[in-house]
Image (spheres, grey):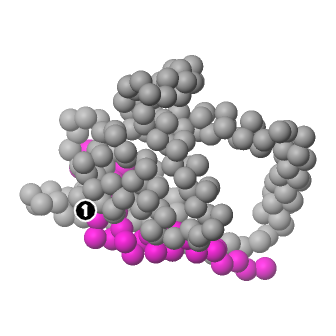
């Protein structure tokens, strides 16, 4: 992992020592939430976003159910996000898998469907409960149900170091290395806090 590639990221790259004495770079994000400065450019962006959200809200009022607009985008997002894990599936294959509710699904289809189920689960939960670390863990459990890795403590923070790279690559050759497992609980603490801002 090249530190130069992350110089503008929300965090820093530090060097860590491996179990066999080798060294590798690790990305450590800054504590959450970030401090936001509301300058003229950001206020303009927010105003445009609010205008578009107003239009979208108006469109939703004309539909029998807002899900008619939301679900197709959720499926598309699920397909794109699961590609990080190597999943390769088309929208047509996802729709066919959803239609065959009781039939066995391919692993790729199950991963995408789990993603959709996880978002729907979270949206239901936050109607009555706050977004907290327990909800994040519950979402992870839903996400991992019945797919590769479901035996690796779903619903819990990881206890091993992982990385993104080619199948046979060493951690020192990885494209990206997230924080070590000991740092994860502390880093996750601010994930549900409202960002601070300065006028």
Q: Is residue 193 magenta?
A: yes
The answer to whether residue 72 is left or right of residue 99 is: right
Q: Secondary structure at mark 1?
A: loop
Residue 187: image quadrant is bottom left
| Above-or-below relation of 124 to 102 | below
Residue 34 appears anywhere in the view: no
Between 165 and 159, the one lying in front of the other is 159
Q: Is residue 24 magenta?
A: no
Mark 1 burial class by Cα count in 10 Å: few <14, some 14-19, many 20+ = few
Q: Is residue 76 above or below residue 41?
A: above
- The magenta region covers 172-199
> In the image, what residue occupies the spot 25% across and 35% down?
167
Which is more toward the observer, 65 or 172? 65
x, y percent for residue 80:
53, 35
Q: Is residue 104 visible?
A: yes
Q: Quadrant of residue 37?
A: bottom right
Q: Quadrant of residue 88?
A: top left
Q: Is residue 175 left or right of residue 93?
A: left
Residue at x 33% of width, y 71% of height: 183
Residue named by callout 1: 159
In the rendering, at what x and y percent does residue 192 appear?
A: 55, 70
Q: In the displayed structure, does residue 48 sit left or right of residue 140?
A: right
Residue 183 as seen in the image, left or right of residue 151: right
Q: Position of residue 111 (x, y in %)?
A: 43, 36
Q: Say if 157 sits above or below 142 in the image.
A: below
């Amino acid at each position: 992992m090249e530190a130069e590639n992350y110089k503008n990221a929300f965090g820093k790259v530090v060097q860590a020592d491996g179990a066999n004495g080798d060294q590798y770079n690790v990305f450590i994000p800054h504590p959450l939430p970030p401090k936001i400065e509301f300058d003229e450019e950001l206020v303009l962006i927010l105003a445009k976003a609010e205008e578009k959200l107003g239009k979208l809200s108006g469109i939703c009022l004309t539909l029998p159910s807002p899900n008619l607009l939301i679900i197709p985008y959720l499926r598309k997002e699920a397909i794109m996000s699961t590609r990080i894990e190597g999943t390769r599936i088309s929208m047509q294959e996802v729709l066919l898998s959803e239609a065959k509710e009781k039939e066995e699904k391919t692993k790729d289809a199950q991963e995408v469907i789990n993603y959709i189920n996880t978002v729907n689960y979270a949206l239901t939960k936050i109607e009555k409960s706050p977004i907290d670390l327990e909800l994040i863990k519950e979402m992870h459990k839903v996400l991992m149900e019945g797919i590769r890795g479901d035996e690796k403590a779903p619903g819990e923070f990881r206890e091993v170091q992982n990385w993104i790279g080619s199948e046979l690559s060493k951690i020192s050759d990885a494209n990206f290395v997230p924080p070590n497992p000991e740092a994860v609980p502390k880093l996750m603490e601010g994930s549900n806090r409202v960002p601070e801002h300065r006028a």
